[in-house]
Amino acid sequence: MSDASSDETIRAAAQASKAWPYEEARRLLKRWPEGKPDGSAIVFETGYGPSGLPHIGTFTEVLRTTMVRRAYEELSGGRPTRLVAFSDDMDGLRKVPDNVPNPQLLEANLGKPLSRIPNPFDTEDESFAAHNNALLRRFLDQYGFEYEFVSAAERYNSGAFDEALRGVLRSYQAILDIMLPTLREERRLTYSPVLPISPTSGRVLQVPVRVVDAEAGTIAFTDEDGTEVEQSALGGLSKLQWKVDWAMRWVALGVDYEMYGKDLTDSGVQSGRIAAVLGGRKPEGMIYEMFLDEKGEKISKSKGNGLSIEDWLKYGSDDSLAFYLYREPKRAKNLHLGLVPRAVDEYHQFRDAYAGQEIDKRLGNPVHHIHGGAVPTGALPLNFALLLNLVSLPGVQDKTVAWRFVQRYAPDTSPEQNPELDALIGLAVNYARDFVVPTLKRRAPTEDEAAALRDLDAELANAGEADAEALQNIVFEVGKAHYGKERLRDWFGVLYETLLGSAQGPRMGSFIALYGIDNTRRLIAEALAS
């Protein structure tokens, strides 16, 4: 099949696919059936508020939006696209986050734009926002995203938003007519679409504003000290109220697609109406459910109860993170480190299945969207769960030692030839050390259990060079002899609890083949001696 006909086949299958990135992309095709009239790129946007450290929820928006962007490019035959990662770093700091150093420095600068607050971290970044922006960009770059980083502070300060600000001033009353009915009575008294920056304190002010001259960009207001001030709203001397700012940004940047969390549903409606007043159009976008921590509470940057990007990558691959974030975006999900092992193994299961699937199944496979269709090949010789069981054992809690066991199990592997496996072993060592080993407690077998273990030991003594499948059969036969077919689950529970110290465990034949028959017999001897 030629490349052209292959592309057409994929496009036809994608048109019918129920995978959510394609469903989102089809909405963009409906918005611009022939592409934009001037041939310019379809603009995707993600937003970030750098009042707290970036966490996985922040990264998720960029990942998922990228998946929609790729799906649109597939469906449209390669029409141009852009992804803007926008940082609202002109926002005033409302409260000091719980998870940052030098809180007194931030306390002294409350109310000031995030980009004008000193950096409390021990880095060379010039401001609090610059530090947090750098963290976000570093990970986006590490993951290989194609994006354009846009700073609100740079756009406001340079005058790039000045014409859009004039548009807000021209439509001041129309915007008030949209917003005031949505506010509490006391809030209406001080609400203004434009937030001036005090010429004396440098803080972003929540005060009523009078438009003096929309074309000149001049406004009047009462400063914190009671002084009546008349100054420009342009060139970084003001910023817009959040919902107005969002709408202005959509219009000024020509945004066609932006997804956002369920908590912003009403904001999206109001910002969409404001965008129409400003002569623009609300972007297409998916409303996704929020992530919850392991206690079921909403993840918050200021609380610091979410995961940092670095947290997950200490224990799981970036592909496993992408896999977890891809699935069921419209359903609330817990997000904590206990999910890492399963996500790692499920990612590889889906990846291993990809090459043998029909085209419609491929396009619905998460790995197609994680890798933009360029899915890596090559299966690993063992999974993460099995590695965790190995490196949780005394004397194996080291990457170099673990490799000796792995190479005996899979002789053709090496750290140099198998860097993905090498990285996975290192991650397993980290996870086992921090989360598995502290929970392990091997119990002594009962008299009946000890009899079964002695029989297993005798069978293993005569197993010779048996492979994983043959060893699994040995374990099964001993179990059936002592527990019957009906209670084999109990037999495996005995093995996990007495040999490994855990309530759950691996496929025992694979574990014995990996750990070694002699080493496994030593585990049995220790259990019997206890």
Image (cartoon, grey):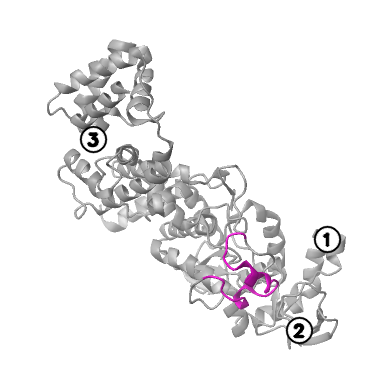
Identify which amino acid the numbered label 2 is placed on.
Answer: Ala
When asked about the image quadrant of residue 27, the answer is bottom right
Residue 235 versus residue 473 in the image, above or below: below
Res 214 label? 2
Task: Name the image quarter holding the C terminus.
Answer: top left
Q: CA distance from mark 2 to mark 3?
A: 76 Å
Q: Which residue is mark 1?
A: 181
Q: Position of residue 413 (x, y in %)?
A: 18, 47
Does the image show residue 514? Answer: yes
Residue 269 versus residue 233 in the image, above or below: above
Residue drawn at 61 percent across, 74 percent down:
252
Q: Position of residue 58 (x, y in %)?
A: 53, 59
Main secondary structure of the magenta stretch: loop
Upstream in the sequence, badge 1 or badge 3?
1
Q: Position of residue 190 (x, y in %)?
A: 83, 70
Q: Position of residue 221 (x, y in %)?
A: 82, 81
